[in-house]
Image (cartoon, rainbow, N blue to C red):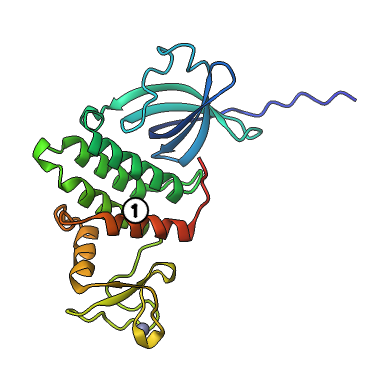
């Protein structure tokens, strides 16, 4: 028996967005992952994007894009109908250090952002970081890692995975001001000895620097940001939303 013709309405989404990944598919298409302001992370097909550069001239990461996506309840992937440049960030792409930091932030975003759920705080955070990297003067190179680390700590918080660095996550006893603490990333932050804290030691100075960085001080980690960046990385691994691309 022939199936009755059903017409499911196409849904249209207009939003500002960041491109977080792109993969070729078929002869001319791209599968693109977008972090949209209005609907969070979505996957879309950009048809013929590789055949005609003019069709979606703006399909590059780092810049704020304006996109129109059409989706059907029957398909996982929406279709990219339009994309244009809303706010270019040429400053980021002109330098290797800012380009690498921005790329790292977008990889974190892919792992932190849930699919099809608006995340305004995460949207603000990642765009604030990209704006800062874009506007960074040539003399600001030492700030790049510090900005990235602070933003990473805030991205964790925006996702509900904040690391507790002021008190023990178990008994809530405040950390000693001047002596070292034990950081257990898997437990979600500092665990005091009485609560069985095991793991890596964080000096008082490091802990304060982490807190200042998370609080928005761009210079908090200019003397060394790699440990904080590694901590963010591991915290995301623990929560692992499992975004593979
Ligand atoms: Zn405790």
> Where, quadrant-wise, is the N terminus in this rendering?
top right
Quadrant of the rendered image containing residue 196:
bottom left
Is residue 198 left or right of 74 when viewed as pictured?
A: left
Q: Identify the residue at horizontal 26%, vertical 49% (top origin).
A: 148
List x then y, in percent, for residue 193: 35, 85
Q: Where 159 sits versus 181, above or below?
A: above
List x then y, in percent, for residue 9: 62, 28
Q: Residue furthest toward the right?
A: 1
Q: Identify the residue at horizontal 22%, vertical 28% (top origin).
A: 94
Which secondary structure lies at badge 1?
helix
Quadrant of the rendered image containing residue 179:
bottom left
Quadrant of the rendered image containing residue 194:
bottom left
> 153 or 121, which is in the foreground?
153
> 71 or 53, which is in the foreground?
53
List x then y, in percent, for residue 85: 32, 24
State ligand 1's quadrant: bottom left
> 15 or 102, which is in the foreground?
102
Q: Which residue is mark 1?
A: 155
Q: Where 134 sits versus 172, above or below?
A: above
Q: Identify the residue at horizontal 39%, vertical 67% (top origin).
A: 185
> 182 or 65, which is in the foreground?
182
Q: Within 10 Å of the Cα at label 1, are there few (<14), some (14-19), or many (20+) other Cα atoms?
A: many
Q: Residue furthest toward the left?
A: 139
């Amino acid at each position: 028996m022939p199936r009755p013709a059903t017409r499911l309405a196409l849904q249209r989404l207009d939003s500002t967005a960041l491109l977080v990944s792109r993969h070729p598919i078929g002869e001319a298409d791209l599968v693109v992952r977008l972090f949209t302001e209005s609907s969070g992370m979505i996957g879309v097909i950009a048809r013929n994007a590789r055949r005609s550069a003019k069709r979606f001239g703006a399909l590059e990461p780092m810049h704020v894009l304006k996109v129109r996506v059409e989706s059907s309840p029957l398909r996982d992937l929406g279709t990219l109908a339009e994309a244009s440049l809303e706010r270019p960030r040429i400053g980021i792409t002109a330098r290797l250090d800012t380009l690498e930091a921005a790329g790292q932030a977008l990889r974190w975003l892919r792992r932190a952002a849930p699919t099809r759920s608006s995340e305004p705080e995460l949207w603000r955070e990642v765009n604030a970081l990209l704006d800062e990297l874009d506007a960074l003067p040539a003399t600001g190179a030492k700030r790049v890692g510090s900005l990235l680390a602070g933003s990473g700590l805030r991205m964790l918080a925006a996702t509900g995975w904040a690391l507790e660095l002021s008190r023990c996550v178990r008994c809530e006893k405040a950390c000693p001001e001047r002596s070292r603490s034990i950081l257990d990333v898997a437990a979600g932050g500092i665990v005091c000895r009485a609560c069985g804290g095991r793991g890596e030691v964080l000096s008082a100075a490091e802990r304060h620097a982490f807190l200042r960085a998370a609080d928005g001080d761009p210079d908090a980690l200019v003397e060394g940001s790699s440990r904080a960046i590694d901590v963010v990385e591991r915290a995301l691994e623990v929560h692992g939303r499992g975004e593979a691309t």
